[in-house]
Amino acid sequence: MHDVYPLLKYTDFPEIYRKKLKTAQVNLGYKCNQACVHCHVNASPKRKEEMSKNVMLDILHFVKVFDIKSIDLTGGAPELNKNFKYFVKELKKMGCHVIDRCNLTILLEKDQHGLAEFLSENEVEIIASLPCYLGENVDKQRGKNVFQSSIKAMRILNDLGYGFREKLKLNLVYNPSGPELPPSQVKLKTDYIKFLSDKYNVYFNDLYTITNMPIARFGSTLVSKNKFNSYMKLLKNSFCEGTLKNVMCKSLISIDYKGFIYDCDFNQMLNIKTRNGSPNVRDLPDILAGQEISTGDHCYGCTAGSGSSCGGSLL
């Protein structure tokens, strides 16, 4: 796989600084039951990295000390971590709002029986990847029969109240299939709702559009197809200054499976350290308001067009 960091390291991206920390995004490991083309984590069934229970204990203490109320669990497939349920239950005891970045198909795995019920019982918000409402496009990006499995998983979640009950949020994520910007989030949500409800009788709360980041597997594919430079030109030419005030790194930190802190999940994957050297949560470092955020050319992916974040469009 091509190393794209040298192509992104030197940048003219504007200086940005952290504001009040609201969310800790925690990567529980890189193992996944899928190996998607666009994956910026390069996750797959072959990956072995997994957060230990000891690191989870360090994070629980860190969350308590800094009074962080929103915990965003990601991976890989975060549910494949053997201590996933323990971690969720401990976070809920602390009064945290817990988000699970779910690929939907994980709910159907044989060793994940009861997972959907566990998520609903603990009122975990689900942000689920469904990069298109057309099966052919989803399978092309995520693997054979992934779309039908995703629809089946959505039906299970709907039956439990997800998409209907106030505390059981089911939000979907769209990302382009190639090197282009997402369409209007508002319009696309309308299309998703109509198509999925009419054809499959499944329901969700919101839709988030996310720009593909030119890193890891997707970035390497761009290099192989000689499209990396043209994609970066698109991102830079589409820069929108109005998105800067809402970029997610201003209120979020990313914690890797070993407990080290990064300014965002993308920086974690590129090993771009924070200005104070990506300290470990166990050291209770000062990571709050006022610190300059480390950037690279990939940051234009968050500020192109209507902007992009783990919560969708920024405008």
Image: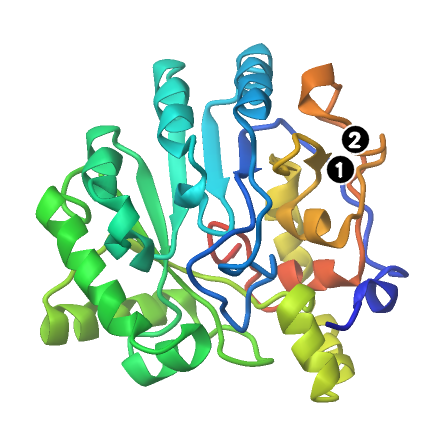
Counting from the top left corner in percent of width and height, residue 100 is at 39, 42
Q: In this view of the protein, which residue sits in the foreground, 299 or 17? A: 299
Callout 2: SS: loop
- Residue at 55%, 70% in the rendered image: 38
Callout 1: SS: loop
Check disc 2: other Cα within 10 Å, few if <14, some if 14-19, many if 20+.
Answer: some
Q: In this view of the protein, which residue sits in the foreground, 23 or 223? A: 223
Looking at marks 1 and 2 on the same chain, the residue that comes earlier in the sequence is marked by 1
Which residue is labeled 1 in the image?
17
Whether pointer 1 and pointer 2 mark residues with C-beta atoms closer than 8 Å, the reply is yes
- Residue at 55%, 19% in the rendered image: 63
**Amino acid, disc 1:** Tyr
Q: Residue 162 vs residue 310: left or right?
A: left
Q: Residue 122 vs residue 82: left or right?
A: left
Q: CA distance from mark 1 to mark 2?
A: 5 Å
Q: In this view of the protein, which residue sits in the foreground, 17 or 240? A: 17
**Residue furthest right in the image:** 10
Q: Residue 163 vs residue 181: left or right?
A: left
In the rendered structure, find residue 2 and report the number of the disc placed on it: none
- Residue at 68%, 69% in the rendered image: 214
Whether residue 191 is visible to the viewer of this picture, yes or no, is no
Check disc 1: other Cα within 10 Å, few if <14, some if 14-19, many if 20+.
Answer: some
Image quarter in which the N terminus is found: bottom right
Counting from the top left corner in percent of width and height, residue 6 is at 87, 65
Counting from the top left corner in percent of width and height, residue 184 is at 43, 71
Identify whether 13 is placed above or below 7. above
**Amino acid, disc 2:** Gln
In the rendered structure, find residue 291 and report the number of the disc placed on it: 2
- Residue at 63%, 59% in the rendered image: 302
| Count of picture labels | 2
